[in-house]
Image (tube, rainbow, N blue to C red):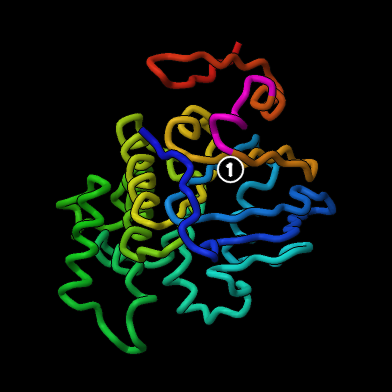
Amino acid sequence: MGLSAPVPGGATPLLETRGLTVSAGGRCLVADLDLELWPGEALAVLGPNGVGKTLTLQTLAGLRAPAAGEVRVDGQLLAAWPRRTLARRLGLLPQGTEDPFPATVMEEALIGRHPHLGFWQWESPEDQEIARRALAEVDLAGLEARSLDTLSGGERRRLAVATLLVQDPGVWLVDEPTNHLDPQHRLAVMRLLAARAAQARAVVVTLHDVNLAAGWCSRCLLLFGDGSWQLGPASEVLSETAVSKLYHMDIRRVEFEGRALFLPL
């Protein structure tokens, strides 16, 4: 289950930060972050509410400017990419999803194909088939004609994951993908993200569940909310001391059938 940390196979990481600083409301949340993300990696970003997980993801996506430092995609500064081209290399699953206009499940999934289409170009039968396969991967097959306003919170979340599948970027920035999901679909989504990373892509996923991070991610980035952070292989970073400090509570790490589990005391 999960991924082992890959050996970099090329000279240029898919995503890179140098001295990245994220601030909000006069607070420095993340200071001088140096990160290289390579094909095959799944990186979990962990921390309690308010430490900057979402803001960091938005900064990596280019939706907000860093307080300092830089972000590069395929070796090129983020700001230098044309937005349509960048959307084929980097995709964001936001924490919340709004539906301002009526649409069906299929219409929403096909939004993921927009970066791959020319101006005024309509989706082809091949695009529709890509969307159908993505919907099947998140257990929404047969709901293509359903209106968005008839979906449950979990179904809507899985549809957002399917839309990112349809987009098929090289780097996935995924903010709390397991929100609203039952245990079955929570594990299915994590399995899906790990499988995409294994296909020479890279995934950055914010999580609240440290056990999901330990089971499915090769590396972890712990954000403490005061600018400090800790980055490294999940097996090393996720210690009792570090996780207890991160969540301001006593947490015990136990081994069960070869897996590390974290339990609050």
- Residue placed most toward the observer, 255 or 162: 255
Quadrant of the image for the N terminus?
top left
Left-right relation of 265 to 69: left
- Report the magenta stretch's main SS: helix
120 and 98: which is toward the camera: 120
Q: Quadrant of the C terminus?
A: top right
Q: Residue at x 53, y 42 (%)?
A: 44
- Residue 23 appears in which quarter of the rendering? bottom right
| Image-based side of 170 in relation to 143, left or right | right
Q: Return the x and y of residue 99 as percentages of the image width and height.
A: 41, 61
Q: Residue furthest bottom?
A: 120
**Region in magenta:** 233-241
Report which quarter residue 114 is drawn in.
bottom left
Work out whether 172 lies above or below 120: above
Tell me the amino acid under the disc marked 1: Val
Residue 171, image x and y in percent? 47, 60
Q: Which residue is mark 1?
A: 45
Outermost top residue: 265
Q: Who's the residue at 47% across and 39% down the image?
A: 217
- Left or right of 238 on screen, residue 103: left
Residue 99's place in the image compared with 180, above or below, is: below
Instruction: Indicate yes or no whether the magenta region holds residue 255.
Output: no
* The quarter of the displayed image where residue 108 is located: bottom left
Q: Which residue is at a point 54% across and 61% down the rendered structure image?
A: 13
Q: Position of residue 223 (x, y in %)?
A: 68, 40
Farthest residue to the right: give it.
26
